[in-house]
Amino acid sequence: MWGHQHGAFSMYKRTPSRDYSAVMDVEENSALSQSSMDVETKNPSWWLSFPHVVVATISSFLFGYHLGVVNEPLESISLDLGFSGNTLAEGLVVSTCLGGALIGSLFSGWIADGLGRRRAFQLCALPMIIGASTSATTKSLAGMLIGRFLVGTGMGVGPPVAALYVTEVSPASVRGTYGSFIQIATCLGLMGALFIGIPVKEIAGWWRICFWVSTIPAGLLAFAMMFCAESPHWLYKQGRSAEAEAEFERLLGGSHVKYAMVELSKLDRGDEADTVKLSELLYGRHFRVVYIGSTLFALQQLSGINAVFYFSSSVFKSAGVPSDVANVFIGVANLSGSVIAMLLMDKLGRKVLLLWSFFGMTISMVLQVAAANTYVSGAAYLYLSVGGMLMFVLTFALGAGPVPGLLLPEIFSSRIRTKAMAFCMSVHWVINFFVGLLFLRLLEQLGPPLLYSIFASVCMMAVVFVKKNVMETKGKSLQEIEFALLPQE
């Protein structure tokens, strides 16, 4: 979804390496540079970078799996661990994971910059394995919460690192398609959790198996990353230009390396070696893009989507729909919307998809409000509640789901990219935490009509915000986007 038709290798306008850029500045004025401009018009083969992207998206699969793993088994978990009927404890089982994700996301930028992208992936897999094992073997609520917190720390590191890595190793011609793999992998993870949770009511203790299963892809991620390419952009930023060239050769092919390095050197700025402070993200030149990114994530979470994923079983049960059937339909709607978004992202653009997505979510929540009113009953209630819920998930997956995570690496300048991603993901997890913790209680106290009306209002606010603040990035180079959004000093 990040693919742009603005000329090959615009993606390589990244971080500096002063020694190499000094050499390349000379080359850019030479016949060699001109020759590169003439010869390197053919896009590199997509299959060279494809395996590396697939391995990276295992982290997104785990992200989706752990978001949905307690959905169906939550009732069985509460019975076995002795907190059945305690909605606050049930909310903690969900939201403790999100609290851990907040901690992980706060440090994700520093981990990705300090250790590199590959080691960051391996590091995020470790607490996922330990945490899932703890949850699978626990006999108390406290043990479950500890396990969920550990899993959450890995979840907090994974998504921002995956977005960075996929952007940095993908050829520009397929960056959009590869970027969409993140959302599709997340959907597959959610669907996997829903499918594996189906036997939970028939088989005692099956919820423990649901947690054990997640250790397999986590272990695979840690192992397979040993054989994947490190981000050439991170290596270049570390001054390891020879290694960056070698990784470009693995990802693009030998004939494209020189031009990729020339393009990578073009963002050489003296201030890029400086440490990015949090204060720089909150005011001054960078405030606008950080404001846009964090607000998009806030609106995404306040729309109510994760309330749907976490507690869809409870909502559908009240509508008289078997939860396993409802969960399957939700997974299919989510995946279908993500695939459609992948096909449309580089044709219609990010902003158009965001606008229509949030507008569709507004209509869907209006249907839910109508279904929740007392004068609607029988078949009408079934169609409005189930249809509205499925439409909400579908329209979310068309834009509000995938676009924010794909848009942020585009609008953030190379200097602040990792830290700004970490900050915005932290906003994402804070709101996600409170939605997961309070949704059932708010549903009880406010009632469905009022709560769904609030969600609908948030979605409509998102339409207005996107219209006024989000610029279209389709077809623009990273330098053009940075120039348009970042005031020049």
Image (cartoon, grey):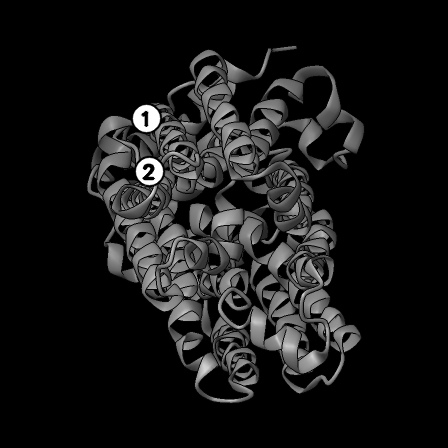
38 up-or-down from 84: above or below: above
Residue 58 spot, x, y in % from top left = 45, 66
Q: Which mark is residue 233?
A: none
Residue at image position (72%, 49%) is 110
Indicate left or right for 19 with 197 as reference: right
Residue 78 spot, x, y in % from top left = 65, 73
Residue at image position (34%, 43%) is 377
Q: Judge the density around disc 1: few (<14), some (14-19), many (≥20) Cα neighbours within 10 Å.
A: some
Secondary structure at numbered mark 2: helix
Q: Which mark is residue 356?
A: 1
The C terminus lies in which quarter of the figure? Answer: top right
Residue at image position (67%, 87%) is 137
Q: Do the residues labelled 1 and 2 touch (CB within 8 Å)?
A: yes
Residue denoted by label 2: 395
As shown in the figure, which amino acid type bears the numbered disc 1? Trp
Indicate left or right for 7 with 201 as reference: left
